Image (cartoon, coloured by chain):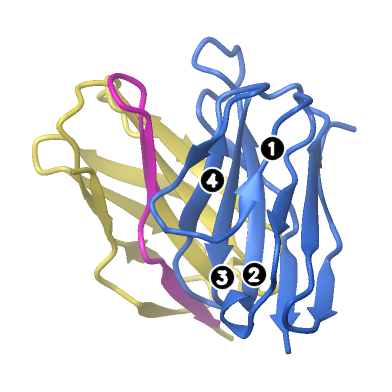
Chain colours: A yellow, B blue
Amino acid sequence: AQTVTQSQPEMSVQEAETVTLSCTYDTSESDYYLFWYKQPPSRQMILVIRQEAYKQQNATENRFSVNFQKAAKSFSLKISDSQLGDAAMYFCACSTTSGTYKYIFGTGTRLKVLA
Amino acid sequence: EADIYQTPRYLVIGTGKKITLECSQTMGHDKMYWYQQDPGMELHLIHYSYGVNSTEKGDLSSESTVSRIRTEHFPLTLESARPSHTSQYLCASSEPRGGLGGRETQYFGPGTRLLVL
């Protein structure tokens, strides 16, 4: 069965500092995508960053980057120079594109940014 | 502007009423999804669709039903609302496997917060 695990229910970071959110996944498929989504309080869920499993290079989007360790099935999100607007729930997700279609979300990590 | 819309945004209704939550997207996406999410909690997939006339049940058992008669429209219906249905319902869509954009990226609507008294 495909699973996505986020072991940190809540994290805090000081403004302008760096924080890393953890995610591990398990899938038997060889072709899949990994995502981090952000859900600010009472606002729409949006994509933060995505990673194709066949790409070895870690994805980067401005202050957001991932550490993709395929062998370890780990997909952590690093937020640099944290801003107050980064405070949100962050969900890790895995989508398989072969065999039975699956799109699984983790349980989420609540990120607090301290001024 | 291409987007995904949900109406109503908030709904308070009595037990036993029939309700339909609307979801529309203007991005031409084939795949659409319905999730149930309690505040600050994880998402549970309750229904999804690969395209017109395709509907599948998700991982979480739900008493709701869906239909997909048009590509852009994916309504969710509860025949008889109960207090246990109180939750937030999120609709999403994604490009097909052969899409040119961000493949498999899901685009979410603003959600419908449902309260059943």
Kind of residue indicated by mark 4: His
Q: Count the numbered circles shown.
A: 4
Q: Quadrant of the N terminus of chain A?
A: top left
Q: Position of residue B28 (x, y in %)?
A: 75, 21
Q: Are marks 3 and 1 in contact (CB under 8 Å)?
A: no
- Give the magenta range: A93-113
Question: Is residue A91 left or right of B84 when viewed as pictured?
Answer: left
Kind of residue indicated by mark 2: Gln
Residue at the spot of label 2: B88
Where disc 1 sits, the SS reads: loop
Q: Position of residue A15 (x, y in %)?
A: 53, 77
Residue at the spot of label 4: B47
Q: Is tag 2's residue or tag 4's residue first in the polypeptide sequence? A: 4
The picture quadrant where one finds residue A17 is: bottom left
For marks 1 and 4, give the CA distance: 10 Å
Q: Nearer the viewer, mark 2 or mark 1?
A: 1
For marks 3 and 1, give the CA distance: 32 Å
Q: Give whichever of B45, A70 is nearer the camera.
A: B45
Q: Is residue A21 in the magenta section?
A: no
Q: Position of residue B103 (x, y in %)?
A: 52, 23
Q: Is tag 1's residue or tag 4's residue first in the polypeptide sequence? A: 4
For marks 2 and 4, give the CA distance: 14 Å
Where disc 3 sits, the SS reads: strand
For marks 3 and 4, give the CA distance: 25 Å
Residue at the spot of label 3: A88
